[in-house]
Image: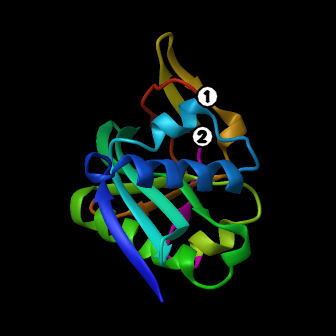
């Protein structure tokens, strides 16, 4: 029997945070950096537990995305992963259901950046591929992030968007998206 939990970073204890970090390190084959970890903190975490074993995680953090002259309050998804031996059993869907509940209840827009090969999972859930240019509002101005195009998805809640328009994310250390 699995248990899905949602909690803000401030409500998680050291053992839970360590379990999340361990899961993310394994799921991203050691390519989950300290900066990536920082991006996943400060918001609401959805976790899936099987007894005392963490098998799934995702977080939604607030960001500002600029589109069509507006700064949109955006629930940005980070650190989405399911333990390799438990994939394909609905645990990722359980994580996403909880994160989407938070996005729909608190934000104008949901957004995420994904790796190749998993886009069908998100589109089946109603997420839309961003088809326009992607940019970041860097310290030196707006800079296009072409390497991220084709991997950005949005979930419109209250925001009116043109998915072929320009989408600009706020600046942060590490990966812009």
- Where residue 73 appears, x then y in whole percent? 28, 46
Crowding near pointer 2: few (<14 within 10 Å), some, many (20+)? Answer: some
Q: How is the image coloured?
A: rainbow
Question: Does 86 sit above or below residue 69?
Answer: below
Residue in the foreground of this view, choosing between 162 and 19: 19
Q: Is residue 22 left or right of residue 73?
A: right
Magenta-highlighted residues: 124-132
- Where residue 48 appears, x then y in whole percent? 47, 72
Rendered image quadrant of residue 145: top right
Question: Does 104 sit above or below residue 11?
Answer: below
Residue 133, label in figure: 2
Q: Which residue is mark 1?
A: 144
- Where residue 126 appears, x then y in whole percent? 49, 75
**Residue 159 seen in the current view:** no
- Where residue 36 appears, x then y in whole percent? 56, 37
Crowding near pointer 1: few (<14 within 10 Å), some, many (20+)? Answer: some
Q: Quadrant of the C terminus?
A: top right
Q: How many marks?
A: 2
Q: Mark 2–mark 1 contact, CB under 8 Å? A: yes
Residue 152, label in figure: none
Residue in the foreground of this view, choosing between 9 and 136: 9
Q: Magenta-highlighted stretch: main secondary structure?
A: loop
Residue in the foreground of this view, choosing between 19 and 110: 19
- SS class, disc 1: strand
């Amino acid at each position: 029997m699995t248990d899905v939990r949602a909690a803000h970073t401030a409500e998680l204890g050291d053992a839970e945070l360590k379990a999340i970090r361990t899961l993310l390190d394994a799921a991203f084959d050691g390519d989950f950096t300290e900066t990536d970890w920082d991006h996943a903190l400060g918001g609401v975490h959805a976790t899936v537990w099987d007894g005392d074993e963490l098998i799934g995680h995702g977080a939604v953090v607030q960001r500002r995305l600029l589109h069509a002259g507006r700064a949109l309050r955006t629930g940005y998804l980070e650190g989405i992963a399911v333990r390799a031996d438990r994939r394909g059993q609905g645990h990722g869907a359980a994580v996403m259901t909880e994160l989407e509940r938070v996005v729909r209840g608190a934000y104008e827009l949901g957004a995420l950046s994904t790796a190749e090969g998993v886009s069908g999972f998100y589109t089946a859930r109603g997420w839309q591929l961003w088809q326009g240019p992607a940019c970041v509002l860097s310290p030196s101005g707006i800079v296009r992030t072409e390497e991220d195009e084709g991997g950005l998805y949005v979930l419109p809640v209250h925001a009116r968007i043109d998915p072929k328009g320009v989408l600009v994310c706020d600046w942060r250390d590490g990966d812009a998206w």
